[in-house]
Image: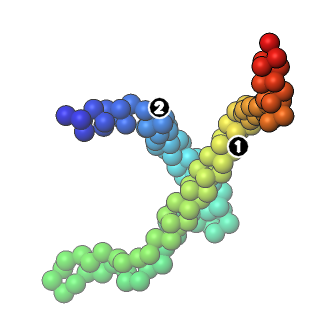
Amino acid sequence: MGMLKEFKEFAMKGNLVDIAVAFVMGAAFNKVVTTFTGGVVSPLVGLLFQSDFNDLKWVISPATVDAAGNAVEEIAVLYGSFITSVIDFIIVAFVMFIIIKAINKLKKTEEPAPEPAPGPTQEELLTQIRDLLKK
């Protein structure tokens, strides 16, 4: 029973909830970036290559029909899709960098705790004791 209580305390800590919210937001943001890359960036880069950027590939074995009349699919390395994913990653990483940088600027810098006042020196203590003994 103690382990269940410990897990509940762990799960309800603010940091874990924050991470869960960030994960959901990141998944939603990834969809936006993927759409941006596929709809805006890829066509513009595709203009440079004179083709659809996502269709760039290196065909290792073209599609054929074997002797029995069965279609054999082509075997290809889809490097255009890989490059699109790398661009997606770079965009997400850059935006996250900007967000973290902005959050760090907004955070108030914590002032260091004031140092405790130094206690009385040995001479001051002896003076206080002497004065108390005179009374």
Asked if the residues shown at circle 2 and circle 1 are in contact, with their CB atoms under 8 angstroms apart, the answer is no
- Identified at 46% across, 70% down, the residue is 78
Q: Mark 2 points at which residue?
A: 14
Closer to the camera in the image, 25 or 11: 11
121, above or below 97, in the image: above
Label number found at residue 36: none
Q: Where is residue 3 in the image (x, y as percent from the top left)?
A: 25, 39
Q: Nearer the viewer, mark 2 or mark 1?
A: 2
Task: Give the residue displayed 37% in from the left and 81% down from the top.
Answer: 62
Mark 1: secondary structure: helix
Residue at 44%, 79% in the rendered image: 59
Mark 2 nearby-residue class (10 Å; few <14, some 14–19, many ≥20): few
> Considering depth in this image, is 95 or 63 the residue closer to the camera?
95
Instruction: Say which amino acid is labelled 1.
Output: Lys
Q: Quadrant of the N terminus?
A: top left
> Residue drawn at (51%, 46%), measured in percent from left and top?
30
Label 1: which residue? Answer: 101
3 vs 62: above or below: above
SS for tag 2? helix
Residue 9 can be seen in this image: yes
Q: Residue furthest bottom?
A: 67
**45 vs 100, nearest the viewer:** 100
Above or below for 130 versus 17: above
Instruction: Indicate how the structure is coloured in the image.
Output: rainbow
Task: Name above or below for residue 97 compared with residue 102.
Answer: below
In the rendered image, residue 93, in percent from the top left (x then y), is placed at: 61, 52
